[in-house]
Image (tube, grey):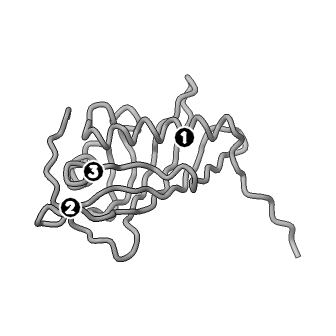
Amino acid sequence: MSQEAALPIADSTTTQSVFDWLERFSACVRAVDYAAARQFWHPDIIAFGTYQELIRGLARWTETQWDNVWPRTADFAFDLDNTAVLVSADGGMATVITPWTSTGFHADGSRFDRPGRATIILARQADGHWLGIHSHMSLQRGVPQDSHGNRPVKAR
């Protein structure tokens, strides 16, 4: 029987830097501020999402995902208490496994809980900051796909 190595759980400093990234990005989602959010992601990101199976590039991701979700929902936040951060041996890449919460809106304007989960891969840049290179976000089972909010985009 082989001995499996332990999961590469990030140390507290790395975890805190990733949590900071998550908090700052989620503030952009809540503000529907695409311009501010772009700095968190590589321009050639490869992502999966609710509205597209495979998305290549930040511009396409914005058009197919952000436009269909951010203005139509509210209160987006990552659940940091239940988030795991794994890190490569050299500290250059982190994988984030995180639940998130948000509020959806039925067609009549009534609100509903809209929880989901995400896997995000971050690459550490030469200056030390994290840049997202992959995202896969999905709703929890049974959560309505459509939300009918109508919040303005702060900045494109």
- When asked about the image quadrant of residue 114, the answer is bottom left
| Location of residue 9 in the rendering, given as x and y in whole percent from the top left corner | 70, 50
Q: Which comes sooner in the sequence, label 2 or label 1?
A: 1
How many numbered marks have been drawn onto this rendered protein structure?
3
Asked if the residue at tag 2 contacts the one at tag 3, i.e. Cβ–Cβ closer than 8 Å, the answer is yes
| 3D distance between C-alphas at marks 3 and 2 | 9 Å
Q: Residues within 10 Å of mark 1 (few under 14, many from 20)?
A: some
Where 92 falls versus 138 (above or below)?
A: above
Q: CA distance from mark 2 to mark 1?
A: 28 Å
Quadrant of the rendered image containing residue 143: bottom left
Tell whether 127 sits left or right of 56. right
Task: From the top left corner, tell me how far across and down residue 107 is, in percent.
Answer: 12, 66
Q: Are marks 2 and 1 in contact (CB under 8 Å)?
A: no
Q: Amino acid at mark 1?
A: Phe
Q: Is residue 77 left or right of residue 86?
A: left
Q: Which residue is label 1 attached to? A: 19
Residue denoted by label 3:
74
Q: Quadrant of residue 24?
A: top left
Residue closest to the far front: 110
- Dot 1 falls on a residue whose secondary structure is helix
> Looking at the image, do the residues carrying marks 3 and 1 touch, with CB atoms under 8 Å apart?
no
Instruction: Give the residue drawn at x 25%, y 54%.
Output: 73
Please name whichever residue, 141 or 120, is drawn nearer the observer in this view of the structure. Answer: 141
Task: Say which residue label 2 marks.
Answer: 105
Left or right, 21 with respect to 67, comes to right
> Where residue 74 sits in the image (x, y, percent)?
27, 50
**Between 70 and 1, the one nearer to me in the picture:** 70
Closer to the camera in the image, 48 or 15: 15
- Amino acid under disc 2: Phe
* Rendered-image quadrant of the N terminus: bottom right
